[in-house]
Image: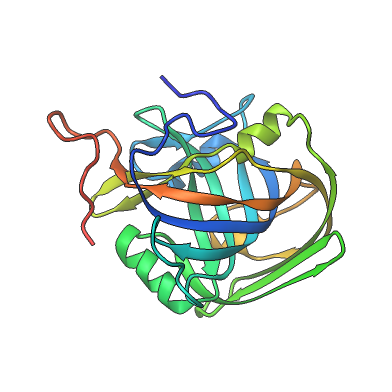
């Protein structure tokens, strides 16, 4: 059975191993046919849909203050800009999540660590952010030979008092799916409900979506949102569709 879309995590973390804050977020989304993205998802997951459609998101933000749950924050390396391309998934165990197709970040060490431990598609990139009043602007160019880049600017509007079903579907995500070490994993997250604002897309010049194997952004997005951000905790990764007799949390090699 697929879990409901809920405003806060339906699975409270039994133990957190990492914390950070996601601040000054911009969410821009387009609808896409589920069959188009299904081959891009890890085994034992499928596109999550709303009214027959699934979505691709371009999300830019400041990641701040990474650290252990009860330890100090990591200086410098624990704070950086990030822009990611994400899809929406549900696994064989019914957990809704996101799948990242690319994750651009401006700090090399976290990029290497996340790629090694979780096989997340991080790339080292040149990035910049600017805020002028209610306008948030982000730009990113990966340092790989492909030089995939994006730039976008969004004006934050009125607070979202009552999210639409689509706004709820796109933001109320409590984990990610990734393929690592021969298994598909679910990495749970936990934070307060998103404080959201509707946004107006002022500028977009994107090459990240096609570089991630997705259709290039065309036409108006179906949803533009901003958020001042949340503080996030990560739980231990769990294997999807674990074999009979395995504990509820599989062990991931590092």
Would residue 90 appear left or right of 212 to someone viewing this image? left
Is residue 38 at least partly visible in the picture? Answer: yes
Which of 97/235 is in front? 235
Is residue 54 at least partly visible in the picture? Answer: no
Which of 202/254 is in front? 254
Tell me residue 204's x, y (percent). Answer: 77, 62
- The residue that appears at 48% across and 76% down in the rendered structure is 75
Which of 52/169 is in front? 169
Would residue 24 appear left or right of 35 to someone viewing this image? right
Residue 158 lies, with reference to residue 153, above or below; the image says above
For the C terminus, give its image quadrant.
bottom left
For the N terminus, give its image quadrant.
top left
Q: Residue furthest left?
A: 245
Residue 147 lies, with reference to residue 133, above or below; the image says below
Tell me residue 136's x, y (percent). Answer: 78, 63
Which of 214/88 is in front? 88
Q: How many marks?
A: 0
Q: Residue furthest top?
A: 1
Would residue 113 appear left or right of 54 to someone viewing this image? left
Tell me residue 89's x, y (percent). Answer: 48, 38
- The residue that appears at 42% across and 34% down in the rendered structure is 12
């Amino acid at each position: 059975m697929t879990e409901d879309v809920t405003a806060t995590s339906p699975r409270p973390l039994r133990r957190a191993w990492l914390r950070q804050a996601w601040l000054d977020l911009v969410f821009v989304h387009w609808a896409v046919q589920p069959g188009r993205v299904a081959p891009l998802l890890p085994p034992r997951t499928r596109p999550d849909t709303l009214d027959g459609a699934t979505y691709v998101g371009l999300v830019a933000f400041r990641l701040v203050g990474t650290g252990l749950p009860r330890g100090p924050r990591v200086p410098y390396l624990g704070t950086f800009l990030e822009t990611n391309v994400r899809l929406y998934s549900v696994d064989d165990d019914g957990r809704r999540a996101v799948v990242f197709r690319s994750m651009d970040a401006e700090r090399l060490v976290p990029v290497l660590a996340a790629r090694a431990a979780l096989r997340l598609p991080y790339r080292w990139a040149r990035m910049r952010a600017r805020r002028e009043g209610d306008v948030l602007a982000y730009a990113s160019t990966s340092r790989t030979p492909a030089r995939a880049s994006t730039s976008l600017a969004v004006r934050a509007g009125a607070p979202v008092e009552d999210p639409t079903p689509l706004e709820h579907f796109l933001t109320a995500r409590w984990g990610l799916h990734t393929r690592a070490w021969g298994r598909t994993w679910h990495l749970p997250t936990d934070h307060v409900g998103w404080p959201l604002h509707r946004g107006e897309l002022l500028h977009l010049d994107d090459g990240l979506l096609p570089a991630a194997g997705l259709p290039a952004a065309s036409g108006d997005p179906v949803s533009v949102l901003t958020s001042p951000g949340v503080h996030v905790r990560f739980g231990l990764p769990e294997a999807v569709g674990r074999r009979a007799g395995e504990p509820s949390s599989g062990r991931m090699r590092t």
